[in-house]
């Protein structure tokens, strides 16, 4: 074989087995000792601060898991609550390391707004909330009504697409933030309020003293895959966020829980032992140490535990898993193999 080819081959082999370099985002996270996480200001189940200033929610737990994986401590997160207007600029300008916010992954946002979506943590769809006593049963009944909606969202466009396709007339009443839109809806300004279906349930919990007076109609009119996003230009950081989320999903597949992670490290399946760093060091592939995933799982639990605590049976929302079940249980969650 030609000598240059052999040298090129050897060089290639040595490159692929090199430990990944820490990217610039991870470097600055290590220097400052904190992950800066941009979250929704107040959305029960996704991100909300309690009376003691402790943050809770699925988006919050994603950031905690990342802090545990990268810094060894799930508490090392600085929370930056962001409204819809501040959201994308905060990531683009470097004010936050990650957006873990109820943001829908769309092509425009992913391809043309300086960011990459990482991995879907919640599959939602756009729904409509009405007052129970209105007697409105389905979207057909919304013809010629006023619909409250927030600007700058995927919601606005889906709404007009859906009604136009069915030649149904409606009047949209547009607000710049969700406080204003839900207030207007509760005051009777609109017959319905539309946004992601889960957010509707979440918002009404806080906005009304009698949330049971409102219902979400059965039809969902869009796909709203919610995913954390990172700034473009740092592949290493992108990989870390993506694989931490994959690790939480894989942990559920493998039956690894917050409580049994230590035991699974030694006694779990080959995949579990690999994930937890017992058999192999997958951390070096993403610039971390071998315990990265074990720490993330120990901090927040597997995906199912995160879901239950924040959105499911263990939470006031008590949502069914629905599309957010693992693929093998009929849902859409499917993590690529960690190996
Ligand atoms: N997922 C959709 C809709 C998201 C959305 O409208 N969220 C609202 C209602 S929960 C929100 O977070 N508003 C925050 C704000 O107005 O500051 C999107 O990404 O456009």
Image (cartoon, grey):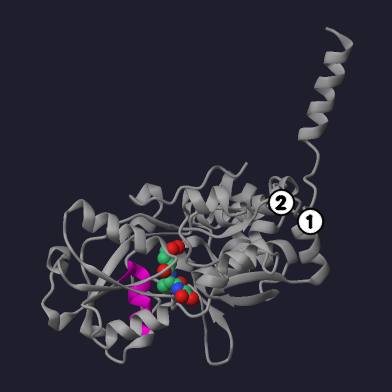
Q: Which quarter of the figure is the N terminus placed in?
A: top right
N-terminal of the pair, mark 2 or mark 1, is 1
Q: x, y (%) of residue 335?
A: 51, 47
Which of these two is toward me, 249 or 113? Answer: 113
In the depicted structure, whether residue 285 falls above or below residue 323: above
Q: Are marks 2 and 1 in contact (CB under 8 Å)?
A: yes
Q: Residue at x 17, y 64 (%)?
A: 139
Residue 298 visible in the picture: no
Dot 2: element: loop
- Structural crowding at the residue carrying mark 2, measured as other residues with C-alpha within 10 Å and reported as few (<14), some (14–19) or many (≥20): some
Residue 196 within the segment the image draws in magenta: yes
Q: Quadrant of ligand 1?
A: bottom left
Q: How many marks?
A: 2
Q: Which mark is residue 24?
A: 1
Q: Main secondary structure of the magenta part?
A: helix
Distance between mark 2 and mark 1 Cα atoms: 7 Å
Looking at the image, which residue is at 65% across and 50% down?
239
Quarter of the rendering containing residue 184: bottom left
Asked if residue 19 lies left or right of residue 183, the reply is: right
Task: Give the image location of residue 229, x and y in percent.
Answer: 58, 58
Image height of 106 relative to 54, above or below:
above
Residue lying at 54% horizontally and 66% vertically, measured from the top left:
301
What residue span does the magenta drawing correspond to?
194-205
Quarter of the image where the C terminus is located: top right
Residue toward you, 293 or 153: 153
Element marked by disc 1: helix
Q: Is residue 313 left or right of residue 256?
A: left
Say left or right for 53 vs 289: left
**Pointer 2 residue:** 234
């Amino acid at each position: 074989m030609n000598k240059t080819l052999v040298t090129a081959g050897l060089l290639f082999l040595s490159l692929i087995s090199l430990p990944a370099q820490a990217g610039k985002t991870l470097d600055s996270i290590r220097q400052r000792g904190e992950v800066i996480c941009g979250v929704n200001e107040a959305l029960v189940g996704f991100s909300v601060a309690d009376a003691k200033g402790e943050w809770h929610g699925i988006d919050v737990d994603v950031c905690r898991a990342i802090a545990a994986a990268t810094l060894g401590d799930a508490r090392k997160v600085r929370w930056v609550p962001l409204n819809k207007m501040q959201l994308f600029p905060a990531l683009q300008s470097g004010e936050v390391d990650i957006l873990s916010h109820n943001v829908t992954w769309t092509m425009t946002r992913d391809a043309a707004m300086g960011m990459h979506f990482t991995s879907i943590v919640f599959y939602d769809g756009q729904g409509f909330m009405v007052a129970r006593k209105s007697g409105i049963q389905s979207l057909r009944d919304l013809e010629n009504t006023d619909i409250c909606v927030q600007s700058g969202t995927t919601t606005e466009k889906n709404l007009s697409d859906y009604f136009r396709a069915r030649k149904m007339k409606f009047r949209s009443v547009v607000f710049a933030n969700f406080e204003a839109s839900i207030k207007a809806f509760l005051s009777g300004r609109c017959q319905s309020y539309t946004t992601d279906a889960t957010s509707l349930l979440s918002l009404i919990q806080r906005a009304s003293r009698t949330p049971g007076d409102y219902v979400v109609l059965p039809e969902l009119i869009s796909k709203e895959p919610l995913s954390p996003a990172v700034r473009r230009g740092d592949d290493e950081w992108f990989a870390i966020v993506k694989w931490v989320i994959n690790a939480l999903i894989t942990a559920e597949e493998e039956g690894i829980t917050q409580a049994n992670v230590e035991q699974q490290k030694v006694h779990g399946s080959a995949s579990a032992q690999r994930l937890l760093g017992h058999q192999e060091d997958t951390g070096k592939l993403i610039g971390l140490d071998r315990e990265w995933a074990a720490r993330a799982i120990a901090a927040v639990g597997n995906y199912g535990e995160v879901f239950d605590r924040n959105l499911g049976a263990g939470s006031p929302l008590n949502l069914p898993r629905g599309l957010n079940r693992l693929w093998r249980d009929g849902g859409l969650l499917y993590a690529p193999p960690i190996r």
